[in-house]
Image (tube, helix red, strand yellow):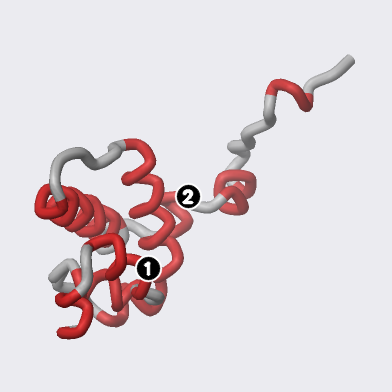
Amino acid sequence: MSELNELSLHEAMEELVSAEDFLDYFGVSYTPEIVNVNRLHILQRFHDYLNAHPASGDEEQHYAHYRHWLTQAYNDFTTSDALTEKVFAVFKKASGIAVIPINAIRR
C-alpha cells in the first residue's frame, strides 16, 4: 500500500482492485467477514453514491469525499444485508421492483 501513497489519487484508484484494497487505501476500518459476504455490494454502493454525489475541489477534498462515501457504503452492510439493500438489479427484480426504460414500452 505504501507505493500507492506515491501516486496521485486518480492513479491510485486505477490500481485498486478489491474491496479490501479500497477500504485499506481510504483507511476505513472493516470486519473481514462482512467484506467477504458483501464485497461486490459494497463496491457497487460506493459507485452509486459517487454517481449521486460527485466530488469537487482539490485532490485532498476528493480523497475525503471518496472516504466518506466508501465508509457509508461499508456501513450500509454492517447493519443490513444484500437482500434488504437491493444494490443489484437481480435483487430489485426478485422483490418486485423493476425498472423499464420508457422507450421499451410500446403498443
**Residue 32 picture location, percent across and down:** 27, 81
Residue type of the residue flagged with mark 2 = Lys
Q: Outermost residue, bottom direction? A: 2
What mark, if any, has residue 37 been given in the picture?
none
Q: Are marks 1 and 2 in contact (CB under 8 Å)?
A: no
> Could you tell which of marks 1 and 2 lies nearer the N-terminus?
1
Q: Give the residue drawn at x 24%, y 71%.
A: 23
Query: What residue type is disc 1 on?
Result: Glu
Q: Is residue 73 left or right of residue 101?
A: left
Tell me: residue 89, above or below residue 75: above
12 displayed left or right of 67:
right
- The residue under the point 47% across, 56% down is 83
Q: How many marks?
A: 2
Local SS, label 2: loop
Badge number at residue 86: 2
- Nearer to us in this view, 78 or 89: 89
> In this orientation, which residue lies closer to the viewer: 48 or 74?
48
Query: What residue is disc 1 on?
Result: 14
Residue 53 percent location from the top left of the image: 29, 37
The picture quadrant where one finds residue 55 is: top left
